[in-house]
Image (cartoon, rainbow, N blue to C red):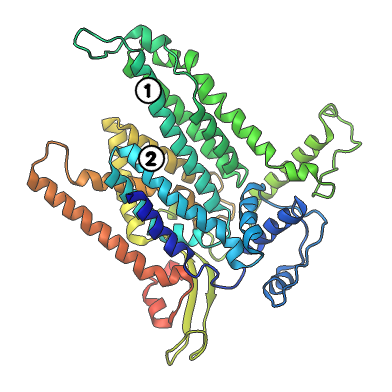
Amino acid sequence: MGPVLVAVLAGAVRFWHLGRPRALVFDETYYAKDAWSLLRLGYEGTWPDRKIADPQILAHPRTIPLSDTGAFVAHPPTGKWVIALGEWMFGLDPFGWRFMTAALGTLSVLMLCRIGRRLFRSTPLGCLAGALLAVDGLHLVMSRNALLDLVVMFFVLTAFGCLLIDRDHARARLAAALPVGADGRARPDARTGDHAGTGARPWRLAAGLFLGLAASTKWNGLYVLAFFVILTVLWDVGARRVAGAGRPYRAVLRKDLGWSVLSLVPVAATTYLATWTGWFLSDKGYGRHWADGRGGTYSWVPAPLRSWWHYEYGVYQFNVGLHSPHAYESNPWSWLVLGRPVLFHYESPKSGRDGCHTAVDCSQTVLALGTPLLWWSACCALVYLLYRWALRRDWRAGAILCAVGAGLLPWFLYQDRTIFSFYAVVFVPYLCLAVTMMLGALSGPPGADRGRRTVGAVAAGVLVLLIAWNFVYFFPLYTGQTIPYADWHSRMWLDTWI
């Protein structure tokens, strides 16, 4: 019941006035229109310049100036298909193109409650993790706008949950295979640890499917796949060692590596390719017939696949070569401390208009900014988790750090590329898990006395209340509410936020 209540709270703030502002906010101008094109054509068609197309889409009566000429796009289709589902249900308007990200954002809160419950073996801690995600500003903003990164976050989180379930099931099967002594207790056994199988692992196949969907939304999902393959191998090694294997790495190589690599990677790759079905079936998709009639070394490969590969290579060249300066670009070094949030939308309503009831002008903004106290607490929590993983060998800390690293570290490879801090929404759930684990530790170990537990619980409760207050304080900046200019300026805690 607790996770459902937390999810209801999250959904209430994510769907509240979802159609406001009535505009194509930031990169919605690309993804909302591409989603509609996929819905109508099966591939991304061509739109006029945004200064022409956007007002026509938002006008009454509406005009949709879509051409069936294939357009070059920088990202795979899955995330836009997700957005298109909302447009299919509610039409090409702000509520329609934001509906699915709001729904996935709400569902991700529910999922994190359950993931936290499985990770920490505590329903209250699981609900706390979900509640922290519910009150994170960046997650809220990305849930209320039709961009792709929230969709990547959802699929990655789903895969993470599937791998946790797979880990528990595999270890249970190994434990069941161990010999039982006269006292009725199972003990480690070298033969069992080295040779016992773990049976079918459907949850790992499901993880491969969701990681393929993540990668087919944005390519950074490929890095998450690589990190998670390593994570599952290490989990299998740990399970074999606990079961008594004399050479756990060799045992994993013989018994588990196929499930670790040959399920995750091929399933993800097949899923990725399948998401391009609309383009393969089209006749006018961008570059669809590039390889028709061409010879060369790889002429034995079917022309549609060669055309697709050529298109993918062009997309890769575009993405790694994107160096256009932008006022709100930032370096990944600054993301965790919220050095440079991204302004998605800003208007300055005049006094007496658009909800501005003051004698001076007002501000109306949508700022992709994480809840500051939550993120700054997460920086401390990550240091604590490094200690837990490196010195205490806590597998939970390692799993959370792996997921954070998968979302953050690859961006350091692209120091010259134009990148933005809202990409960090992919690892926000794991920051919430990190803070939850730190708060759980504040109450002390199981044997701590009552006074120690009371002090720790009060300290944890105070921090949670401060984070919730911080979210409420910044809420107008996340949702495009009209507030006095002085109130907006008082919330600009750092000069780099302006």
Type of the residue with mark 1: Arg
Q: Which residue appears at 29% of the width and 37% of the height?
A: 121
Q: Which residue is mark 1?
A: 171
On residue 278, which mark appears? none
Point out residue 370 in the picture as x, y percentages from the top left corner: 41, 60
Q: Is residue 428 visible?
A: no
> 10 Å neighbourhood of mark 1: few (<14), some, or many (≥20)?
some
Point out residue 57 in the picture as x, y percentages from the top left corner: 70, 70
Type of the residue with mark 2: Ile
Vertical position of residue 246 compared to residue 91: above or below: above
The span from disc 1 to disc 2 (Cα, nearest Å) is 19 Å
Vertical position of residue 306 compared to residue 150: above or below: above
Q: Secondary structure at mark 1?
A: helix
Q: Which residue appears at 51% of the width and 52% of the height?
A: 104
Q: Farthest residue to the right: give it.
A: 293
Q: Which residue is mark 2?
A: 400
